[in-house]
Each structure stands twice: as C-alpha cells, then as structure tokens.
Amino acid sequence: MSRIPHRFRTGALALALVSLSPCMALSEDPLMVRAVRAEQVETRQHLSLTGEISAREMVQTAFPTGGRIAEIAVEDGDRVKAGEVLARIEKVQQEQSLRAAEAQLAATRAEYDAAQDADRRQTALLERGATTRAARNAAADRFAAAVARRAQAEAELQQARDALEDTVIHAQNDATVIRKLAEPGQVVGAAQPVLELALGEGLDAIFNVPEQKMLGTAEAETPTIILSPIDRPDVQVPGVVREISPLVDPATGTVQVTVGLEEPLPGLSYGDTVRGTSQPLEGRSVVLPWSTVTANDEGTAVWVVDPATSAVSLRGIEVKRYTSDSVLLESGVEEGELVVSKGAQLLYPGRIVALQEDL
C-alpha cells in the first residue's frame, strides 16, 4: 500500500477546513443572550462625610500682659455670665507698682499744694509791692512744674491700676467655655490665648471635603445636609451649607465647608463628631447594570446589539462614576440602545444573537 507524503496530507486537510468553514458559519445558531435597554434617568450622588460640631461665633480670651497663671476658674463646657471671672495671673509685681504709684502721687500732691500756696503768696506780695517780680515768676514756675508732675503721677497711677486689672480675665458676654488652652502654673505671653469661648446658641458642623466631591455643591439651589451623631444615625436634623472656603488645603487637598444646624443635635456639643449626608442632583445619565461592563484594548466597553441585524459590536464607553450595583455613563451609549447583560463571555464582533430583553 502506497503512503501519501505528509505535506500532501496536510494540504488536503487545510483545503477541507477552508471548504467547510463557510458552511459552519452559515449553520451557526444565534447565541441566546440577555440584554437591557439603556435608559437615561435623573441621578443623585450620595455623599457622606464626618465633621465636627463647632460654635457659630467663637472668641479667644487672653491676658494683655504676660505672667504665670494663678487660677483658671472655669472648666470646659461651663456657661458663664458677662462680668464673671474666668482666669487670673499672679499679680505681685502689679500690686507693688500700684503702691509705688500711689506713694508717688501722694508726694506730688503735697508738692503741688506747697507750690500753689507759694505762688498765691508771691502774687499777693507782688500786688502790695512787698516782693520782686523775679521771685513771683520763680514761684509760678515751681507751681507749673508741680502741676505737670502731679498729672504724670496720676497717669502712672491709672496705668498701674489698669495693669492690676489686666491680671484678671472677665467674660465680656454670656458664653460657653469650649476649651482651656492653658493650665494653672503655666507662663503665658501677652495676648497668648488662654480660653476659647462660644458666643450665642448657634451651632455649625465643619467638614473637610475633597475638592472633587464638594458636599452638595452640584445643585443650583442651596442643598440640605442631613446631620446625625456617629453612634445614633436615626437621630437626624437638617443643615444648610453656610460657607465654603475659597482655598484648598495643600496638605490634604480638601476644602472646608461650614454647615449651619437649623436645630441642636440632642446629646452633642462642641467638638463632637457628626456625620453629614447629602444627595445632590447630578443631571441625567445613562445607567447600566454592572453585568454589562467588559473591556477592550482601549478600556471599558459594552456589547451593543444592532436591532436590524441582531449582530453585536464592542463599543467603548466613558464612565461618569460607579455605584454599588450600576454604572453611570458620560458617553458611549444612547438612550434606547440594547446592551448585552448576560452571555457576553461568548461574544465576538459580528456574532448573531437572540435576545431575551430585561425590560
């Protein structure tokens, strides 16, 4: 029996495959897939961040002069009345200065009285011709100098009294102590903050929001922020964005957003952590389920069905953002088009499919 050379057998097999492949392609059954119809809907972005409760109006108190703190008479959270003593520094030096100023004033007053009597006497003697004009002028000069020294002593006494008064910090208004910034025994400088006070009853929540996700700023109208304690999400009060910082923190890339509370949050006070939630409108977007998403050599893509031929094509898409169960598209698919949601792993461009739509 003669043997057919190997190269002839290989060529015959290739020829047979070429001749059969068109028949196989024509006899290939449509692939059953599931599809969804692209819909364009109004979407909202769910944003949730944690912030800190802060007073709407705050002021820091300090001593006008430096010294060692002798007493801080309040604690964090205390409510104080206008005029109430908040803190004191040691006042030994100021008391000594006051006593010295009082003694100096007493001496200058005695000198003033003596110079005044001498001036009056010399004036009377001059009128009777019993003294010289030079003596009269000398007495007048001494009296003028005594007047100046008394005025200076009075000013120094007032300065000493003010310095003694400055050793005590009084509340200028009814307020709440937010926190102490110093402790007794600590040496503080002039104008160094010692206490931070909250004025009034207004509360704010301060959030550091990533620049690309501003809390509710996508809406044209002022958005409402829902605020709740971290450990009690069921307790909620509304808030409104009151201020947005024009500056971005270069270290964190965040923008400070101040949200005003329309009513107090029960159980929360200054410095407590709060969660803020917003659902701003994004506009209309084509929304598809996760199961439709695949990829091509350029990135994210979906399989789109041509309704005229039932053939599929792989089309690139631009994603706006992802959610837990869907994808919001920026572009790539138009409303009403059919997109394969199940069976995509068996597809290739031009493949004929039979649709079972998820409508």
Image (tube, rainbow, N blue to C red):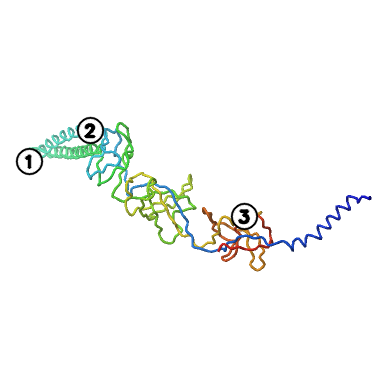
Q: Badge 1 local density, few (<14 within 10 Å), some, or many (20+)?
A: some
Say left or right for 129 vs 44: left
Residue that sits furthest to the left in the current view: 128
Which amino acid, by three-letter code, is at mark 3?
Answer: Thr
Q: Position of residue 14 (x, y in %)?
A: 83, 55
Q: Earlier in the sequence, mark 1 or mark 2?
A: 2
Which amino acid, by three-letter code, is at mark 1?
Answer: Ala
Q: Badge 3 local density, few (<14 within 10 Å), some, or many (20+)?
A: some
Q: Badge 2 local density, few (<14 within 10 Å), some, or many (20+)?
A: some
Q: Which residue is mark 3?
A: 294
Q: Position of residue 271 (x, y in %)?
A: 36, 44
Nearest-to-viewer mark from 1 and 2 = 2
Q: Earlier in the sequence, mark 3 or mark 2?
A: 2
At 53% from the left and 64% from the top, the residue drawn is 40
Which amino acid, by three-letter code, is at mark 2?
Answer: Ser
Quadrant of the rendered image containing residue 71: top left
Q: Which residue is mark 1?
A: 124
Quadrant of the rendered image containing residue 167: top left
Checking the image for residue 97, the label placed there is 2
Calculate the distance from the C-alpha at mark 1 to the C-alpha at mark 2. Answer: 40 Å
Say left or right for 7 vs 202: right
Relative to 274, say whether 168 is above or below: above
Residue that sits furthest to the right in the current view: 1
Question: Which one is in front, 288 or 161?
Answer: 288
Q: Earlier in the sequence, mark 1 or mark 3?
A: 1
Nearest-to-viewer mark from 3 and 2 = 3
Calculate the distance from the C-alpha at mark 1 to the C-alpha at mark 3. Answer: 117 Å
Check disc 2 and report its element: helix, strand or loop. Answer: helix
Say left or right for 228 vs 294: left
Check disc 1 and report its element: helix, strand or loop. Answer: helix
